[in-house]
Image: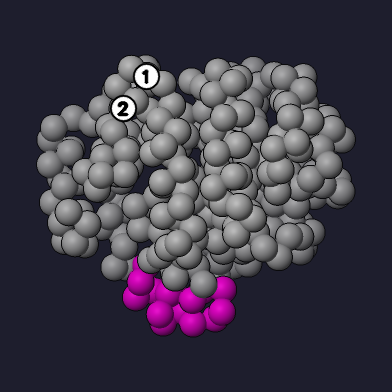
Amino acid sequence: MLENLKGCGTALVTPFRPDGRVDEEALASLVEWQVQAGIHFLVPCGTTGESVTLDHDEYLAVVRITVETAASRVPVVAGAGGNNTAKITGMIAELEKLGVDAILSVSPYYNKPTQEGVYQHYKAIADAARFPLILYNIPSRTGMKVEATTIARLAELGYVVGLKEATGSLDEVQEVVRLTDGRMDVYSGDDSLTLPVIAVGGKGVISVVANVLPKQSADVVQAALSGDYATARRLHFEMLPLIRALFLETNPIPVKAALAMMGYCRDELRLPLVPMTEAARAKLRTVMQTYGLL
């Protein structure tokens, strides 16, 4: 396991300009703010970063800017997943040159492979990589679940060190922790479940909410990991209304709207995502005001 990848990692948004291009200046500013706020690691080009809409050069630019701005102060875990195994393995050398510390790879979507296909997909990525690989299990997005038994098999591979668990099932989390028996670090993929995931053996969260509340998100995880559950519960329950508000619509629509209200980026998304509806935006704004964010 990688000791410096425990804690709270931010699943970074990708800021865009009105003309649709990546807003590199806004991205660098967002990364700097995250690092200064005490986040434990950064995850560019995941689902929250609208990675599926980035072309190859844009993808590499987002990862490069994140790595350069972080400047080794925190680890960078680049999103590198999809349903084309050869394409992902072909990117590994480029990511290595950019200096990422690990990759986060969502399970293949749409193809609906068998569990053996999922295993072979990740094995090919692990064989190509020279740095740690974190699996990402999110059936609501991919249309299929990576079974706990498959994850346990993958934990036997040298570079497979972690799992972002977003099935929404604590039973599933516990089964993965039981079967992997310390061979893999498990991170919550749902902000609302971070605390119970850590309680059953998880090592942190890869968080959407941390885009907006990086210090508080990191503090919740740090308190839980140190065994101070009274503090962790208090902080978690304080954040819960904002967590719910940031998922009123499909992620990353609300978090982009929130960051735009705070002045960190524009409220620009790439189709097929569109900006937040006014009714939901009003609810989000009201919640953000209670946190003193506006």
Numbered circles on residues, count: 2
In this picture, is 65 found above or below 197? above
**Image coordinates for residue 195, horizontal then vertical, percent:** 47, 66
Which residue is tagged 1? 20
User: Residue 183 got which mark?
Assistant: none
Q: Quadrant of the N terminus?
A: bottom right
The amino acid on which the numbered mark 1 sits, given as a three-letter code, is Gly
Q: Quadrant of the C terminus?
A: bottom left
User: Residue 268 got which mark?
Assistant: 2
**Image coordinates for residue 190, horizontal then vertical, percent:** 46, 50
Contact? badges 1 and 2 (CB < 8 Å): yes
Tell me which residue sits at (63%, 25%) in the image: 82
Magenta region: 223-236
Q: Residues within 10 Å of mark 2 (few under 14, many from 20)?
A: many
On the image, which quarter does residue 135 sit in?
top right
Gap between marks 1 and 2, in whole Å? 8 Å
- The answer to whether residue 254 is seen in the rendering is no
Q: Nearer the viewer, residue 237 or 43?
A: 43
Tell me which residue sits at (43%, 26%) in the image: 22
Residue 230 belongs to magenta span:
yes
The amino acid on which the numbered mark 2 sits, given as a three-letter code, is Glu
